[in-house]
Amino acid sequence: MNRSFSKALSLAVIAIIVYSCASIGRPDGGVYDETPPRFIGSTPAVGELNYNKKKLTLEFDEYIKLEKANEKITISPPQVQQPEIKASGKKVHINLLDTLKPNTTYTVDFSDAIVDNNEGNPLGNFTFTFSTGEVIDTMEVSGTLLEASNLEPIKGMMVGLHSNLEDSAFTKTPLERVARTDSRGRFRIKGVAPGSYRIYALQDADQNFAFTQKSEALAFNDSLVIPRWEERMHFDTLWVDSLTIDTVVGHNYTHYLPDDLILRSFTEELNSQYLVKNERLSPEKFSFYFAAKADTLPTLKGLNFDEQDAFIIESNLRNDTLHYWVKDSLLYKQDTLRLSLTYLYTDTLSQLVPRTDTLRLVAKNVNKKQASAKKDKKNKKEEDEVEPTVFLQIATKASSNMDVYDYVSFTFPEPMAAIDTSAIHLKMKVDTLWQEVPFAFEQDSANIRKYNLYYDWDFKQEFELTVDSATMCGLYGLHNDKIKQSIKIKGEDEYSSIFFNVSGADPKAFVELLDGQDKVVRRVNVRNGTADFYFLSPGKYGARLINDSNGNGVWDTGEYEEKRQPEEVFYYPQLLEPKANWELSQDWNVKALPLDKQKPEELKKQKPDEEKKRNRNDDRNKNRR
């Protein structure tokens, strides 16, 4: 009996061991491990001198893996031939393929690429250093990289130094010391030798560490960067208890400067002009798309038709998108239109020269329309059945609860042949009667297929808008159905106002009022140091100011060859939330805070990684409960 019990006990122990080996997961309700891996040794040693081998090995106290190594790991001097970097067990192996430079400090900045194998806890801001010479360069240069147009922090972009102070160095030779920005846009270039440098940022598309493509985002500083250091003291406080201080201990440390550089990233406007594509998606219209804006329209000549007065041309403000609406039905019923198009083209010397292309424009959906017409005819129940009237489709913007500053608009699917404004009626309610009132009606300056109706509304007025049928006739014969819309203007007590008293801005500046998603709600010019926004709906608003250097009313990017920085952008550093019937007056010195401290966190789309990790871990622990 004892033998039977011993045998049963042995089997039970074996079963428990086997189950434990197979079940390696954490018990339900356990807290996640949040401890990152710990570095314990390497070959070469950290800071080793006169090391001239290309193989590096780093060891940690637990099994690790690399996350997005190609994006996060940065080696200085930069490696033109991509190094081989891999994790194996508790080690990271690096094989440098470029020839090592003599008397040079090498740094391998892992950022947060090294994480533990189980929970993915990152070893943040880990950098490994060695030198091929007798000295380790220890200077550092740090700062923040922002998107120039909206002060958004930029993550993962390269920032680097050149000791060659010529402007051409950035376009012809690789950067000498580099780093990548973190999730806050912060960068720290390590292993820098004493001297004078120029600093640049680069979205290096072709991975040659130089600005060689106009499409690459970049940033540059107008001033030289001269690394330096100073001794500073850090104080630690020792407490007897939560209320009583025991001792304050000071520690000296070396602080490297400059540490507050601000770089503003931009992409140059592509000035290379060429015809991107042409298309004729419907018989009545064909389109041309160009790579850059133009001051003049191209010249079109028909080869199998007469082009004189044959089209209505619709263009955008940049003249890089052109739509040609064919007037004559005999012309647009042709399957193929042959024409020559003469336009300005950027040649190999970057000069604009005339170029003529011969084009064949074939209507894409003619056969589909014909097949659809045949199918509709076949499906008729009776030969003499009357087809329903097809009306011109109109997008009418006329809110039943309209803002006092707003207007009515009509947007059409095609250019208009005729509009009878006498058949458009706007009536205002006076006491209990409806009285017709005069209004202004005109074509929109930026869209030939849009027309606007203007009236000087007053608060809480009631209106009735009617458009008789057949009032508006499109280019291809369709007309509108009857339109009827009631309109009530909001009351004055439903609005709020924000008044900015602006200082520190250029004479030519404008302010954009923003919603909670950083989108423009309203825009006003700064006049006599003020920017006033009336008739705002209650809600949350941000604001940014643009120093409009050339006075063209839009933000303009920079240009490296001309050493032109992008136009300056500043943010009001907090969101405002006016209530109905409120007036807020705010003093705003646009240069009171550094640029990286201006944009409110609520408006930033690029969130810090530590915030994302905290939210992720909170969710994990909630799910384990």
Image (cartoon, rainbow, N blue to C red):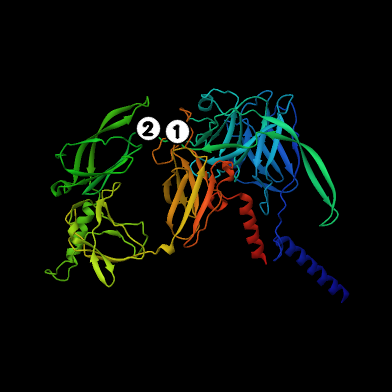
Task: Say whether residue 156 is visible.
Answer: no
Q: Quadrant of the C terminus?
A: bottom right
Residue 542 position, x and y percent, is 50, 52
| Nearer the observer, 228 or 213 | 228
Residue 67 position, x and y percent, is 62, 46
| Nearer the observer, 225 or 528 | 528
**Image height of 508 relative to 396, above or below:** above
| Nearer the observer, 428 or 180 | 428
Asked if the residue under mark 2 is in contact with the one under mark 1, i.e. CB atoms within 8 Å, the reply is yes
Ranked by sequence position, the earlier of labels 1 and 2 is 1
Residue sticking out furthest to the right: 2
Residue 517 position, x and y percent, is 49, 54
Residue sticking out furthest to the bottom: 1
Secondary structure at badge 1 equals: loop
The three-letter code of the residue at mark 2 reads Ser
**Image height of 299 relative to 466, above or below:** above
Question: Residue 214 shows which numbered tag?
Answer: 1
Question: Residue 56 shows which numbered tag?
Answer: none
Q: Which quadrant of the view contains residue 371?
A: bottom left
Residue at numbered disc 2: 272
Residue 245 position, x and y percent, is 84, 52
**Image height of 512 relative to 134, above or below:** below
The three-letter code of the residue at mark 1 reads Lys
Q: Which quadrant of the view contains residue 26?
A: bottom right
Q: CA distance from mark 1 to mark 2?
A: 10 Å
Label 1 neighbourhood size at 10 Å, few (<14), some (14-19), many (20+)? some
Label total for image: 2
| Nearer the observer, 271 or 566 | 566
Left or right of 238? Residue 556 is left
